Image: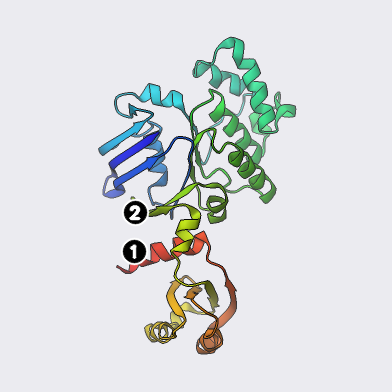
């Protein structure tokens, strides 16, 4: 459905994308995770024909983003992190306006709007102005706007960022309900969101894909059976010799210092008490857990930084 080959984009001296290659299958829900500035938004804006690439090729449904932007735009529904909604419009009128722009047949448009308002749980707010809506309600209307022309491809850029937990859960459930019916790209900072929703996840940093696979495949790459997570009082006091001492324990597979958090991958629990004693008074809190997608992300990005 989407084929990206050697895609590059620079903004002045900043390289946003560096020879990025990626294929997304029809009906797949692909998650893209990465730190701020990794190139996530740049990539999806090029796919959506909002930005032009400097180098490389992007094909969407057989169309080239440089040669066939109108055909591609008709195939895509895009929800940016901050939806630019016309605040003086009523919800119904906003959807009707964009439906007409996308050429939705007039005899179908009213029914389509009613279906979408019901789908996002806003039928009772059809005649309310956008400027009266909370962030969560704006996101719902933004989703409805992205779907008004029944696109084959939907792109969500941080759809639950800044939302209260209940609204975030509702939107995640909605996105999950679209799986299989649409080809979906989900850019997110929330690892549990990517873990629960995505068929595959791409870890992006400095404009390149560091690793990609299903959440299960990525988590299986974490060395060890469990993670010992230690919160340090002062990470500056954790020296290189401390690293080497902890790495010398036979159960230790990997160790990453991320801010005040020391994440240690273990193949057994036998050395936990000795490791905790070694940290001593610099220890604030400690717990053990199964490897998560967040652990994969931290370990992958940290390993690149070390090289």
Could you say where residue 187 lies in the image, as x and y percent from the top left?
48, 46
Q: Can I make out residue 173 in this image? A: yes
Asked if the residue at tag 2 contacts the one at tag 1, i.e. Cβ–Cβ closer than 8 Å, the answer is yes
Q: Position of residue 92 (x, y in %)?
A: 65, 22
Nearest the viewer among 208 and 16 is 208
x and y percentages locating residue 72 in the rendered image: 40, 26
Residue picked out by circle 1:
304
Image quadrant where one finds the C terminus: bottom left
How many angstroms separate mark 1 from mark 2 (CA)?
10 Å
Q: Which mark is residue 230?
A: none
151 horizontally vs 171: left or right: left
For the rendered model, the colour scheme is rainbow
Which mark is nearer the camera, 1 or 2?
A: 1
- Identify the secondary structure beneath mark 1: helix
For disc 2, the marked residue is: 206
- Tell me: residue 73, above or below residue 111: below
Up-down relation of residue 82 to residue 150 (above or below): below
The relative height of residue 29 versus residue 296 in the rendered view (above or below) is above
Residue extending farthest left = 55
């Amino acid at each position: 459905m989407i084929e990206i080959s050697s895609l590059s984009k620079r903004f002045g001296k900043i390289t946003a994308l560096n020879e990025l290659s990626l294929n997304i299958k029809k009906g797949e829900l692909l998650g893209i995770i990465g730190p701020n500035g990794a190139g996530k938004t740049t990539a999806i804006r090029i796919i959506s024909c909002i930005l032009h690439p400097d180098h490389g090729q992007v094909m969407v449904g057989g169309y080239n983003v440089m040669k066939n932007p109108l055909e591609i735009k008709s195939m895509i529904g895009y929800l940016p992190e901050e939806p630019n909604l016309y605040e003086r419009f009523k919800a119904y009128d906003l959807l009707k306006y964009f439906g007409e722009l996308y050429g939705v047949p007039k005899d179908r448009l009213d029914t389509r709007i009613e279906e979408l308002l019901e789908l996002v749980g806003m039928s009772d707010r059809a005649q309310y102005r956008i400027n009266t809506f909370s962030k969560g309600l704006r996101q719902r209307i933004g989703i409805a706007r992205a779907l008004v022309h029944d696109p084959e491809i939907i792109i969500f850029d941080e759809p639950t960022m800044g939302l209260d937990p209940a609204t975030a859960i509702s939107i995640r459930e909605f996105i999950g309900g679209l799986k299989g019916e649409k080809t979906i790209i989900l850019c997110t900072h929330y690892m549990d969101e990517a873990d629960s929703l995505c068929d595959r996840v791409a870890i992006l940093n400095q404009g390149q894909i560091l690793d990609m696979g299903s959440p299960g495949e990525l988590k299986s790459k974490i060395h060890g059976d469990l993670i010992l997570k230690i919160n340090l009082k002062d990470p500056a006091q954790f020296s290189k010799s401390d690293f080497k001492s902890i790495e010398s324990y036979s159960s230790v597979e990997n160790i990453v210092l991320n801010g005040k958090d020391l994440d240690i991958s273990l193949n057994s629990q036998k050395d936990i008490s000795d490791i905790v004693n070694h940290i001593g008074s610099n220890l604030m809190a400690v717990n053990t857990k199964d490897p998560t997608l967040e652990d994969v992300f931290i370990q992958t990005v940290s390993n690149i930084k070390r090289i």
